[in-house]
Amino acid sequence: MLTKNGPTFFGGLLLAMGLCILAGCDQGVALGTVEGRVTRNGQPQPGLWVQFKPENGRPGEGRTDSDGRFELVYSQHKMGALVGRNRVTIYSGGETDSRDNELSPRVEVFTTEVDVQHGGNDFDFEVP
């Protein structure tokens, strides 16, 4: 029998919380989808990491494709970045092998700040 005071209730509560953490539950998180393009002298910049980091919370991150386009991933099941002020950092490098060993460190090439809104956000960046 399930009671609020018994060990079964608390064990079940702990199990549910643990499963939520393992599954990456992000209940109540305000996200905006984020996509855009990174260029240098008007030319697409493939293979760069784009990170949006809020003051508090998890960053959203993506990698530019051959056309310099990116789309941010917030968690395993959610796309975008936290709504509000975010520090944008664009990195080169960061390649890993099949066992996740770092082959080249990330090197910061550009940084700025933007405001992410609810809904869709499109940010284009021209890096030096």
Image (cartoon, rainbow, N blue to C red):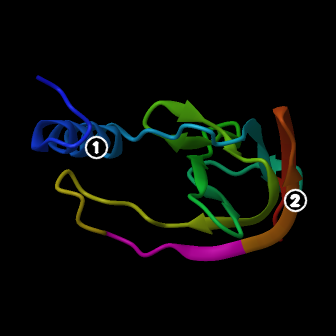
Residue position for label 2: 114
- Measured in 3D between alpha carbons, the distance from the residue under mark 1 to the one under mark 2, in whole angstroms, is 30 Å
Label 2 Cα neighbours within 10 Å, binned few <14 / some 14-19 / many ≥20: some
Q: Which residues are magenta?
A: 103-109
Residue position for label 1: 22
- The residue sitting at 51% across, 41% down in the picture is 26
The mark nearer the N terminus, 1 or 2, is: 1
Label 1 Cα neighbours within 10 Å, binned few <14 / some 14-19 / many ≥20: few
What secondary structure is found at the residue carrying circle 1? helix
- The residue sitting at 55% across, 37% down in the picture is 27
Residue 115 in the image: x percent, y percent?
A: 88, 55
Does 100 sit left or right of 34 as displayed?
Answer: left
For the residue pair 9 and 15, the one nearer the viewer reads as: 9
Q: The N terminus is located in which quarter?
A: top left
Does 62 sit left or right of 122 as displayed?
Answer: left
Residue 80 in the image: x percent, y percent?
A: 66, 39
- The residue sitting at 62% across, 39% down in the picture is 28
The quadrant holding residue 52 is bottom right
